[in-house]
Image: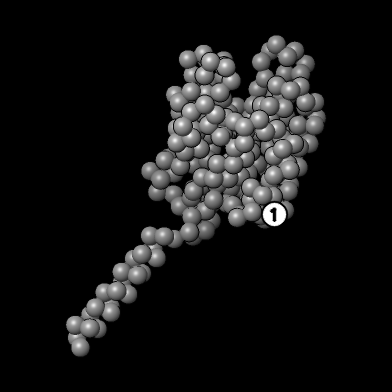
C-alpha cells in the first residue's frame, strides 16, 4: 500500500514537472516582407530564427512568429494584420516599407498604412507592445523622396508610442558581401547583423513585459 501511494505521489510530481516545462510562452509576431521571410537562404538562418536563439539563451519566455511574406508592402500588412494576430501576441515588430519605397509608393500612403497596422493591431490585442523597424531608400530615388521616406518611421513610432529600430539593415544595406547577388536580400552573415540591430530593442521590451507579468 505504501509503495502504491509513493508511486502515485511520484507520478503527480512528474506531471507537475511536465506542466512547468510546457508553460505557455508569449508570442512575438514579426510582420515583414522577404527579408523577414528569409528569401534566398534557409529560414533557420534568417534573423527571426536568430532572435529566437537569443531569446532562448536569455531564458525569456517568448516565441518568435515569422509572419514575413515575400513582396509584401505596408498595404499588404494592413490587410493581413488581423490574421497575423489571430492567436494573440505580446509584441509586434512591424518590418515593412522597403517594397513601398522600391515601388515609389507616396510616403504619405506608407505612413498611413503603418499607422493603420499599429492601430488595428492594438484594437485586436489591447496592451500590445509595438516595435517599428525603420527602412531607408537609396539616393538614386531622389533626395526629396528619400528624405520624406526616411522620416516616416520615427514619426509613426512616436505618434503611436512604439519603440523604434532606426534602420533594420544598418551595416548591411549597401554592403556587397553581406547581400545576395541582387544586393537587396541579406546573406546568412547579413542576417546575423540584422539580428544584432533588432536584439537590443527587442530584449528591452521583452524584459519589461516579463517584469510587468510578475
In the rendered image, the vertical position of residue 112 relative to residue 21, given as above or below:
above
Q: Quadrant of residue 124?
A: bottom right
The answer to whether one can see residue 163 in this image is no
Residue displayed at 44% across by 60% down: 23
Q: Position of residue 117 (x, y in %)?
A: 72, 43
Which quadrant holds the N terminus?
bottom left
In the rendered image, the vertical position of residue 53 relative to residue 189, given as above or below:
below
Residue displayed at 55% across by 41% down: 66
Q: Position of residue 188 (x, y in %)?
A: 45, 26
In this orientation, which residue lies closer to the viewer: 165 or 8?
A: 8
In the rendered image, the vertical position of residue 144 relative to residue 117, given as above or below:
above
Q: Residues within 10 Å of mark 1 (few under 14, many from 20)?
A: some
Q: Secondary structure at mark 1?
A: helix
The answer to whether one can see residue 125 in this image is yes
Residue identified by numbered label 1: 124
In this orientation, which residue lies closer to the viewer: 13 or 43?
A: 43
Residue displayed at 24% across by 83% down: 5
In this orientation, which residue lies closer to the viewer: 99 or 133?
A: 99
Amino acid at each position: 500500500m505504501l509503495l502504491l501511494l509513493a508511486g502515485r505521489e511520484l507520478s503527480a510530481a512528474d506531471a507537475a514537472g511536465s506542466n512547468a516545462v510546457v508553460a505557455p510562452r508569449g508570442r512575438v509576431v514579426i510582420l515583414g516582407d522577404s527579408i523577414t521571410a528569409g528569401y534566398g537562404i534557409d529560414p533557420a538562418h534568417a534573423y527571426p530564427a536568430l532572435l529566437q536563439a537569443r531569446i532562448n539563451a536569455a531564458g525569456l519566455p517568448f516565441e518568435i512568429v515569422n509572419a514575413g511574406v515575400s513582396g509584401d508592402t505596408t498595404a499588404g500588412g494592413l490587410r493581413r494584420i488581423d490574421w497575423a494576430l489571430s492567436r494573440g501576441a505580446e509584441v509586434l515588430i512591424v518590418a515593412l516599407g522597403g517594397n513601398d519605397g522600391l515601388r515609389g509608393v507616396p510616403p504619405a500612403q506608407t505612413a498611413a498604412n503603418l499607422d493603420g497596422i499599429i492601430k488595428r493591431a492594438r484594437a485586436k490585442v489591447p496592451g500590445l507592445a509595438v516595435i517599428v523597424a525603420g527602412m531607408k531608400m537609396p539616393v538614386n530615388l531622389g533626395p526629396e523622396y528619400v528624405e520624406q521616406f526616411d522620416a516616416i518611421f520615427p514619426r509613426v513610432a512616436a505618434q503611436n508610442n512604439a519603440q523604434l529600430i532606426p534602420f533594420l539593415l544598418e551595416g548591411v544595406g549597401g554592403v556587397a558581401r553581406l547581400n545576395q547577388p541582387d544586393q537587396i536580400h541579406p546573406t546568412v552573415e547579413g542576417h546575423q547583423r540584422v539580428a544584432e540591430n533588432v536584439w537590443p530593442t527587442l530584449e528591452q521590451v521583452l524584459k519589461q513585459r516579463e517584469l510587468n507579468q510578475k
